[in-house]
Amino acid sequence: MSTVLAGLRNVLKGQDFNPDDHTGPTHRTLQGAKELALEGFVKGHDFSRADRANGNHGALAPEGSTRRNPRPSTQPLSRGPLPAIALAFLAAALSAQVQKPVWREATDAELSALLPARAPVEKEHIETESSTASGITDGKGHFIAGIVLITAGYSADGKYSHYLVVQSPVRVDGIRLTPGEYVFGYSRNQEDGLDVRLYEALTGKPVGTAKATRIPGTGMVKSLRILPPGEKPLIQIGRFGIPYELLDK
């Protein structure tokens, strides 16, 4: 290209240029220079194949050029505050899951400190049998525990058999028990089970009647055992059991 322009300048230096002269030597010389310049330009350039493939036929690209159409940005688009809100809800849910109490069987020491040697039942204080104590705890000072009453010689004989302390809401076979002290007694029914009648300990007011069904298999037989909900939520009375459900406070 530089060679062509140099030649064109030399030609113009030796000629007077008249723009209205279309037949004279100056016009012919300029016309030849133009053709020479265009030929040199075209020889040194070529349409880019990439441009032809993309339909960009209106521009010339130097031969060997690597010019390409700009690629779209791969940077992720901003999604605003949604991820932060979702993470906040997730953190709250995980925190609630972590803080949910895990109930376990209460130790003998815990039961001895919780259950009285003489239980207040209506107007009497009835002796209890310490070896029969059983219960569960959430490890944070809340218990559901019971013990067998020794009712011989008391007016409760034949009516009550067990004393029950509830420190967290629970549903026993559909009967809701709020925190408090209860007593219960039972009798056999015609369905090979037990009718378990629950009362408020201090007033003797009836609360409801639960159904205890026979526990399949030949497992351990105890006069009272309250199993943790992680195993099988069951209040065992001899060979029979009553399902229970812990409730939110």
Image: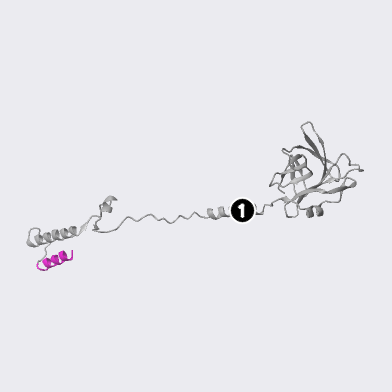
Taking depth in this image into account, of 67 and 193 the one nearest to the observer is 193
- The residue nearer to you, when weighing 70 against 116, is 116
Q: Which residues are magenta?
A: 1-14
> At 7% from the left edge and 62% from the top edge, which residue is drawn?
25
Residue of label 1: 94
- Residue 11 appearing in the image: yes
Locate residue 206: give its quadrant: top right
- Residue 243 placement, left or right of 27: right
Specify the farthest residue to the front: 218
Which residue occupies the foreground of this view, 47 or 170?
170
Drawn side of residue 245 relative to residue 89, left or right: right
Total numbered labels placed on residues in the image? 1
Residue 165 visible in the displayed image: no
Estimate how packed mark 1 is, as few (under 14), some (14 to 19) or many (20 or more) residues with alpha carbons within 10 Å. few
Mark 1: amino acid:
Leu
**Where's the N terminus, which quadrant?**
bottom left
The furthest residue to the left: 24
Is residue 29 shown left or right of residue 216?
A: left
Please identify the dominant SS of the magenta region: helix
Query: Does residue 182 show up magenta in the picture?
Result: no
Q: Is residue 213 above or below residue 228?
A: above
Q: Percent position (x, y) of residue 220?
A: 75, 43
**Residue at point 85%, 48% (across, down):** 129
The x, y position of residue 83, in whole percent, is 53, 54
Q: Position of residue 66 (x, y in %)?
A: 29, 58
Of all residues shown, which one is farthest toward the right? 153
Query: Which quadrant of the view contains residue 32?
Result: bottom left
Q: Splitting the image into 4 quarters, where does residue 216 fall?
A: top right
The secondary element bearing badge 1 is classed as: helix
Residue 13 falls within the magenta-colored stretch: yes
Residue 76 position in % (x across, y down): 45, 55
Q: Residue at x 15, y 67 (%)?
A: 6
